[in-house]
Every structure is written in C-alpha cells, then in structure tokens.
Amino acid sequence: MTTRTLIGTTQQFTIGKIVCLARNYAEHARELGNETPAAPVLFMKPASSVIGDGDTVCIPSFSQECHYEVELAVLIGQQCRTVPAERALEYVAGYGVAIDMTLRDVQSQLKAKGLPWEIAKGFDTACPLSDFVPASQVADPHALNLKLAVNGGGRQDGSSSDMIHRIPQIVAHISAIFTLEPGDVILTGTPAGVGQVSAGDVMTAEISTVGRLTISVA
C-alpha cells in the first residue's frame, strides 16, 4: 500500500489508480511525431509503479530505451463522478511532481501493432511521485514552471500554461468515464524535451511552488 502526505496537514492518501494524459502539450506531441488530440488521450499506471524521492528507477531488461517525462500530478480528494468542469477543482486536494517513465522502444513496438502500451508505462518503479502541496497553496496550476535535469544538465523546461486540455476539463472528462476516488492521481502530460536515461544517471524534477524529486536510475 503506497501513501502520500498532503504537506502541512495530517492527511495521508492511499494512492489508487493513476490516470495519465498523453500528448497534452503540443510541442511534446510534435517531437514524437503525434497529432495533437481533440480529446484527452488516457492511459493508466498501477499504484505498484509508484516510488518516492530518493528512490531508484529500475529499467527492465526487456527495454533498451527508457525515457523521462516530468509532469504535474493532481491528487483527487473526494469521490468524483460526472463532475462539470466549472466544479472540478473542488475535488482536487493537492498538486505534486511526477516523472512518467516510459519504455519508448517497447511503446513504439506495441503502437506499431495496434496494441495497448501499458507495459511501457506501468512497470515497477515507472512512476516517481512526490508528496502533495494543498491545492489552496497553488494560486494557478496553469502557471507553473516544470523542469527536469539529468546529471545536472537541463533537459525539460516548460510551463503548465501550455497544456492543451486544462485541469478542470481533464477532471470532468475522466469523471464522466469512470469514478475518481480519494487518492487517485492524474498525470497531466509533459512538455517537450523528453529523452533517454541510462543506469547510473540521476534525474532531478522540479515544479515551481509544488515540489522536487531526485531519482536515480539502475
């Protein structure tokens, strides 16, 4: 059972399902040669993929190309079903930092066959995730700077203002498909600049006013 704290409170949440958005930043979609989607493109990671600050991503032996993707994580605080966009932020308990680790070679092979690609996204250690700052402490979740460095060298530097689908619309869209529960997490997509890491690398992900993660690779 994996838990995360709401910083500055006594609240702890057991992490449930992790719903992720693909291609939610136009520049990232372009760098991978994908079309910009009209509606959110969703996939999921299991709670068993979550690790924390100071932990290690273990690249599976069946992949030779593991990529990082820094993302703003949204923590759901109460049951959320078919919620209109104008009320969606009422259900958000906090914001955190995540790295969506992706086995790009495995993903590409599966996509080419028209198969689901959760294998490339849901392996053990595939979801480094910080604790969460209360939503009330983030004045505008669409005005945050997202950065990721590998071995001290900057790789990603973007803004949540570039999201194609904004958080209220994302929560409304997902909750119309399946119920979101307290402890569920939404990963909202990554800006451009994704790339490969190898064993021995150290990643540092940071989102302004939200938090920071330092993760090694093995």
Image (cartoon, rainbow, N blue to C red):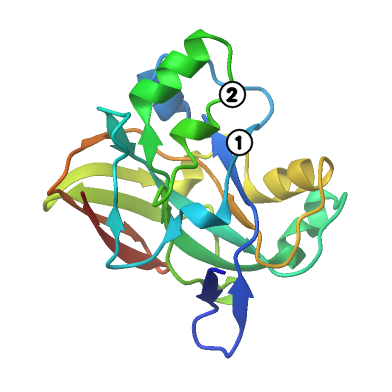
The kind of residue tagged 2 is Pro
**Which residue is at the far bottom?**
10
Q: In this view, does 27 lie above or below 142?
A: above
Report the number of numbered marks: 2
**In the rendered view, does 87 fall on the left or right side of 66?**
right
Return the x and y of residue 34 as percentages of the image width and height.
48, 16
Residue under circle 1?
A: 43
The span from disc 1 to disc 2 (Cα, nearest Å) is 9 Å
Q: How crowded is mark 1: few (under 14 residues within 10 Å), some or many (20 or more)?
A: some
Return the x and y of residue 91 as percentages of the image width and height.
74, 65
**Which residue is at the far top?**
113
Task: Quarter of the image for the N terminus: give it.
Answer: bottom right
The image quadrant that residue 165 belongs to is top right
Q: At 61% across and 84% down in the image, what residue appears? A: 11
Q: At 31% across and 35% down in the image, what residue appears? A: 67
Return the x and y of residue 108 as percentages of the image width and height.
42, 17
The image quadrant that residue 16 belongs to is bottom right
Q: Residues within 10 Å of mark 2 (few under 14, many from 20)?
A: few
**In the rendered view, does 192 fall on the left or right side of 4?**
left
**In the rendered view, does 110 fall on the left or right side of 215?**
right
Query: Contact, CB < 8 Å: mark 1 with mark 2?
Result: yes
Residue under circle 2?
A: 116
